[in-house]
Image (cartoon, grey):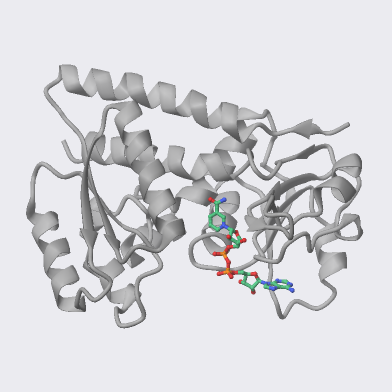
Amino acid sequence: MPQIIDGKAISAQIKDELKERVAALKQEGISLCLAVIQVGNDPASSVYVGNKKKACAYIGIESLSYELEENTTQEELLNLIKELNKRQDINGILVQLPLPGHIDEDLVIRTIDPSKDVDGFHPQSVGTLCIGQKGFVSCTPAGIIQLLKRSGIEIAGKECVVIGRSNIVGKPMALLLLRENGTVTVAHSKTANLKEVAKRADILVVAVGKPKMITREYVKEGAVVIDVGIHRNENNKLCGDVDYDDVAPICSAITPVPGGVGPMTIAMLMNNCVESAALNR
Ligand code: NAD
């Protein structure tokens, strides 16, 4: 049977480490505060925002909540971000996505001061990742690197295939695997012979957003499979982009859904908040 990569346990470990770092920063007189902005009341976004605030409370980071009406104008939102950018007591600013259609998401992301961009979505953060300099890294791919490292899985020299090229998962994932000296291929919706390409992977990261699309026909025997997808199936149960029951018996390690990649995203957001305080002191 494969090694089941336990994202719940690893994220709990990271949060406990961060709690200690926050306590040490507080001893030095440095306190941490994350501003969380939600526009409208999409139920899924409210759950994510609630979980982020809970994680802050656990670690010892103060969180300020801005719950704005669905019809908030773009200008009002940008003005709030500019005000938060100036505030010395706030280390991180997070705007929960997606935003209502009348607001330009890219403009909102670009308005956040890069030194407070704890989601790692600002073009400057993406640029520093690309050229290997210090900066915030998108939380889900950063979490996947931690899952691999803390599970004793070597990346250097491995064939890594990332399926998906989104700005928040696929592309930063590929850059991080490259930074760790993997040999990286990015596959996407226009890739020819996807099965053959995927089968080259020693480490296969799947972020396609299609429930159970990846069966064992895409997976080399003994590969490590990381499933980023989150979906609800017909019985309202969570499942990933990988057909877990089909793939698990042939791989060496795999992340389950739930309990794999998902819990890591918030842990890495917390890590970015702590880093922002440590970096900006
Ligand atoms: P996205 O829709 O922005 O991107 C999907 C990518 O998959 C695209 O680049 C596209 O080219 C590629 N793709 C689509 N169909 C394909 C096909 N048939 N063959 C090959 N490639 C194909 O999605 P995303 O934001 O990157 O998210 C991917 C999945 O991960 C979703 O299920 C999402 O819910 C989940 N997600 C989970 C977390 C987490 O914390 N666990 C975080 C972000 C996203």
Left or right: 268 in relation to 205? left
User: Which picture quadrant has residue 30?
Assistant: top left
Residue at 79 percent across and 53 percent down: it is 201
Q: Nearer the viewer, residue 174 or 244?
A: 244
**Is 186 rendered above or below residue 193?**
above
Residue 133 visible in the current orientation:
no
* Residue at 91% in and 60% down: 217
Residue 154, percent across and down? 69, 35
Horizontal side of residue 242 vs 127, given as left or right = right
* Ligand 1: quadrant of the figure: bottom right
Residue 142 image offset from top left, x and y in percent: 50, 46
60 is higher (above) or lower (below) than 141:
above
153 vs 39: above or below: above
Q: Count the marks: how many? A: 0
Q: Quadrant of the C terminus?
A: top left
Question: Which quarter of the rendered picture does the N terminus lie within?
Answer: top right
Q: Is residue 211 visible?
A: yes
* Farthest front residue in view: 235
Image coordinates for residue 224, horizontal then vertical, percent: 77, 43
Q: Residue at x 83, y 37 (%)?
A: 252
Could you tell me which residue is drawn at 10 percent across and 41 percent down?
89
The picture places residue 179, in percent across and down from the top left corner, at: 54, 49
Left or right: residue 118 compared with residue 244: left
Q: Is residue 184 above or below residue 254?
A: below
Would you say 221 lies left or right of 110 here?
right
Could you say which is closer to the camera, residue 129 or residue 188? Answer: 188
Quadrant of the image occupied by residue 162: bottom right
